[in-house]
Every structure is written in structure tokens, then in C-alpha cells.
Image (cartoon, rainbow, N blue to C red):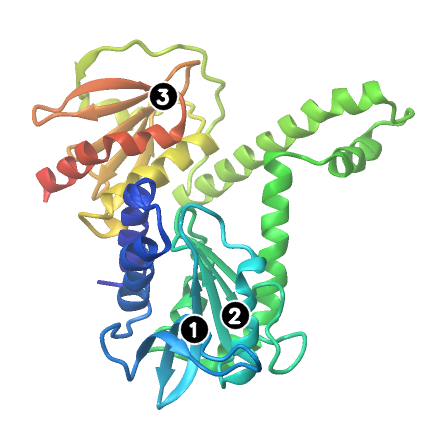
Amino acid sequence: MEFSDRLSALAVKVENQASAIGTEEATKNAFVMPFISTILGYDVFDPLEVVPEFTADVGIKKGEKIDYAIMRDGEVQILIECKASTGAPKIEHASQLFRYFATTNARIAALTNGVIWQFFTDLDAPNRMDAKPFLVLDLLDIDETLLPEVQKLSKDNFDLESIINAAEELKYVGALKREIAAQFRDPSDDWIKYFAQKVYEGSYTQRVREQFTSLVTKAARQFLNESVNDRLKTALGAGVGVRVPTETPVVTSEPVVQDDLDRDTEIETTLEELEGYQIVKAIACGETKPQRVTHRDAKSYFAVLLDDNNRKPLARLHFNGKQKYLGLLDEAKVETRHPIETLDEIYEYADAIREAVVRYR
């Protein structure tokens, strides 16, 4: 399997099993060791490559252990400290990493809960681990631009010099992207005030702040939707009109109309539809390669297909009305719509989506 395929498959495993993992040891066995093995390519059962419960004397902390040390040519290259997947990894959990980083030859340290991987180096001071990671990989929200950098940490592609050279830019670009994303999700008072004062000439009062809180949020979402539409237009090589959908879908079972995806109509592809597509794709990747899972938008629904083939539908996303539905199709290509409130509920139908992939293989 390709590197991205292996990562997608592990991401599906993490999503499906995260709720059943309650301890640090379970996190190591279910998520961390598979990451070291299948993603980074190290043999977790070879002590010349991976040393669990790695021990080194650190000042007065004699015999203190760190969860894993990845070795190359007899030298420690990567230190890994694990926490249970039930909580987010925080810098307060990295005290042992700080101490070990200074007493070994390691230039890379990782703090993880099996879901989120934070990678550190020593940009701020030589041989002293930075307080902020230069790379953050979230297996439930994979940033594909980071994959080449993660791959450099793998056994077959290990390139420490390249990693260190790119670390500073990765550190600040990643931090900026996360901050921008946070502002788009939940704009802060400073963010709202900044944009309000750019377009509003009056005094910035409490009433104005309350008014612009919703306006800035709405404008940000529309900007994202329009940016996505522009990228789709460029990728398709043709103009795609914008339509505001008004009809509300009805829960029914109906046969697939093969020409439905080929209508020359005005279509709006929303960010929510694309997010739903990514979830269906992540589920399907447990049974097939990611590049085989594609999408097409129609007037009344958004279709997720295998091999870009209308005759191989995996799911339909009916997101144009007030009530969202996930459409799943049986062997006779008869669709049943399941009402959902949030996109996360798509994971409840993971088995049916995987069965559809297997059916078309």
C-alpha cells in the first residue's frame, strides 16, 4: 500500500475504535504501535529498531522510562511519549521528553494520544526540546500537505537534515493555520472587532459587536464555500453556477436514475458536502485505495462514487434542506435515506459503506 493509503486505513481504525479505548496501554496497543509499524515502517518487535520502556539516567531521576525510543545504527533518533486517547496531548505531559531530549542524541520527539501526534525538535535552543511542536498530525482530520514531512520520519525515507531544515516553517505555518481555522469556527472578539472596523465607520459599541458577531461568522463561511466552488470550477475546467437550494428532501426509497448526475444544471457544492465526502472516503479507504473514491454533485444530492462511475454509488448526501439525509443503496441500487443531525453520524453507517465498496470490487 502507498503511504497515504496506510495512513487513511489507520485513520479509519482510530475513528472506529477511539470510543472503546480507555487506558494508556490500550492506546499504545491499538493506535501507537500500528503507527510506528505501518506508517513509520519500524519493526516494533525488534529491539534494534524500537525500544519500549526506554530507560536512561536523567540527573536525579534514575531509572525513569519513556514509552518508546526509535533507533537507527545504535543511536536514539526519535523519542515517543504516549498518553491515553481519552484526552488531548498537552505540553504538561511532556516532562520526560524534555529531560530525555537533553541526555540522548535524539533530535525528534513525539507526544501522542494515538489520535493526535505532536512532533518536536530543538529550533529555539540546541539540544533543548521546544515547547511548541513543529508538526501536528491529527488522524481524524489529516492535513495532506503534511504527508511528505511525516514520510521523512519513516524508516525507508528518514531524512533528519531535511526535517530540521523544514521544521521552522512547518511550525509557524501549522500554528497559523490552526489559529485561522479556530477563528473561522468560533471568531474571537478581537477578530470580530478587526473586521468590523474595516467596514463599519461608526463607533464600535456593544450593539455593533453583537451585530457583527453573526455577520463575520456568516461572511467567513460564505468565503470558504465560494473558495471551494472556485477550486472545483478550475478542476472541472468548466463554469459551475451557484444556486441556493430550497427544496427539502423526503424520506423515501427510490431507484437510482443513471442520468441524474449528468444534468446540465446550476449546482452549488458546499463545504459541508465536501466534509461529508471526506468522511465517506475515509470509511471506504478501509476496503480500497483513496484515489478510487470520487464525487459528483447533482441538483438534488451529492454523490460519492467508486471509480467515478455512476453505476458504483457508495452514498448520497442530501444536505440541501433543513434536514440532512445520508442515502445508502442496496444491491438493486434502491436508495434508503437515513436522517442525520451531524456529519459524525455518518460513521454509524460505516459497515454499509464498506459493504458497498466490496460489492463493486
Q: Tell me which corner region of the image, top left, top right, bottom left or bottom right, holds residue 37.
A: bottom left
Q: Residue at x 44, y 13 (%)?
A: 322
Say whether marks 2 and 1 touch (CB < 8 Å).
yes
The quarter of the image holding the C terminus is: top left
Query: In the rendered structure, which amino acid carries the disc numbered 1?
Result: Lys
Provide the secondary structure element on which disc 1 rests. strand
For residue 204, side relative to residue 332 (left or right): right
- Residue bearing the label numbered 3: 299
Mark 3 vs 1, N-terminal side: 1
Q: Residue at x 44, y 40 (%)?
A: 232
Query: In the rendered structure, which amino acid carries the disc numbered 2?
Result: Gln
Query: In the rendered structure, which amino acid carries the disc numbered 3?
Result: Lys
Mark 2 vs 1, N-terminal side: 1
- Residue 120, label in figure: none
Looking at the image, residue 24 lies above or below residue 280: below
Q: Residue at x 67, y 35 (%)?
A: 187
For residue 11, side relative to residue 259 (left or right): right
Mark 3 vs 2, N-terminal side: 2
- Residue bearing the label numbered 2: 96
